[in-house]
Image (cartoon, rainbow, N blue to C red):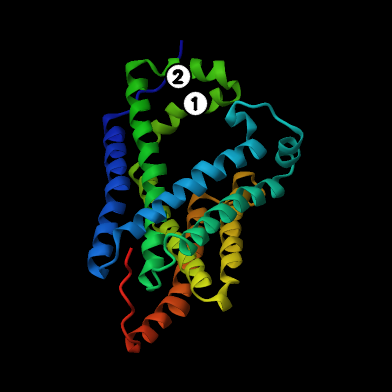
Amino acid sequence: MYDFPKIGTGVIAMMVIAMALFVIAPIVIWIVWTVKKKEKFTTIIVGAVTFLLFAIVLEKPIQNVLIFPTAMGLKEHAASQFINARPVLWAFLVGFFPGLFEETGRFVAFKTVLKKRKNRETSISYGLGHGGFEVIFILGINYLNYIIYAMMINSGTFGTIIEQVEAVAPDQAEAYAALPAQLAAITAFSIFITIWERIFAVLFHTGASLLVFYACKDKKKFWLYPLAILLHTAMDGVLGLTMVNVIMMSDVQIEAVVTVIGAFIFFVPYFLLYKKDKDRGASAEPAAQDPQ
């Protein structure tokens, strides 16, 4: 028998509001952007689908098999033991996989299905699709799960989840056992911090999309593609170092790092690439309509 603290109705209400926000806000931003800029909504969809394909379908299973085999129901192997025994290497790989797969996904999308869309707004449309769908897919679904778990905790049935996890993946049962206390500790401030982080994560994804878009648009700027991989690896790698306590930072300090990096990676390409492209485009002849 398990005796978990009850989740207050106020906490559950905040979860419901957060879930709705994480689902509705990206959709509203997509609609406003495409209507205001007369952009094709299919570019948003390409960004979302590319994220799903490259980050979830391709990256996560490969990363899990190499670094987190137990998450796949597999046994630890020599490579995973070697990596997990070395925190810096672990943090680097945790950053490198998203960097490689997500930036390559952008590159493939801009070179294939979006290759005829050369207008500068395409880069931001793709970035909003990628980053916005990540918010929906990860946080929207996570908070939906939190709500379901909270209701199970309050009804006394959450213990069955732990028993099922113990039967399949015993090493993960402890994390599930700690979940009720974590849910009970959710506050309006913690949700605010999550929202703040996502804002700058979306800015990061949009900035990275700008870099890769111009790497595809101009052969002389191809170096922006590996730069995007490097920057993505660095950002996630730094966060990985905090997870393994190589770098000690409070939650507020971590969010400050995300804020600075996210803002930097968006605004520098925006002013050096997007804005200049806009200035040139203002005096250029209208481009041919995209038949897609």
Image location of residue 125, percent across then percent down: 36, 63
Q: In this rendering, would 273 be left or right of 77?
A: left
Element on which disc 2 rests: helix
What mark, if any, has residue 81 been given in the picture? none
Q: Residue at x 60, y 57 (%)?
A: 233
Q: Is 88 rendered above or below residue 62?
A: below
Furthest residue in direction bottom, as rendered? 283
Q: Residue at x 27, y 63 (%)?
A: 34
Q: Kindly tell me whether residue 276 is visible in this rendering.
A: yes
Image location of residue 159, percent across then percent down: 44, 16
Q: Is 118 rendered above or below residue 46?
A: below
Element on which disc 1 rests: helix
Q: Kindly tell me whether residue 196 is visible in this rendering.
A: no
Q: Which residue is mark 2?
A: 161
1 and 2 marks in contact (CB < 8 Å): yes
Q: In this rendering, would 220 be left or right of 201?
A: right
Which mark is first along the chain, 2 or 1?
A: 2
Q: Is 24 rendered above or below residue 228?
A: above
Residue depth check, mark 1 versus mark 2: number of the one nearer the observer: 2
Q: Quadrant of residue 17?
A: top left
**Which quarter of the image is occupied by the C terminus?**
bottom left
Q: Which residue is mark 1?
A: 176
Q: In this rendering, would 18 be left or right of 248?
A: left
The tally of labels here is 2
- For the residues marked 1 and 2, what is the alpha-carbon distance in whole angstroms? 8 Å
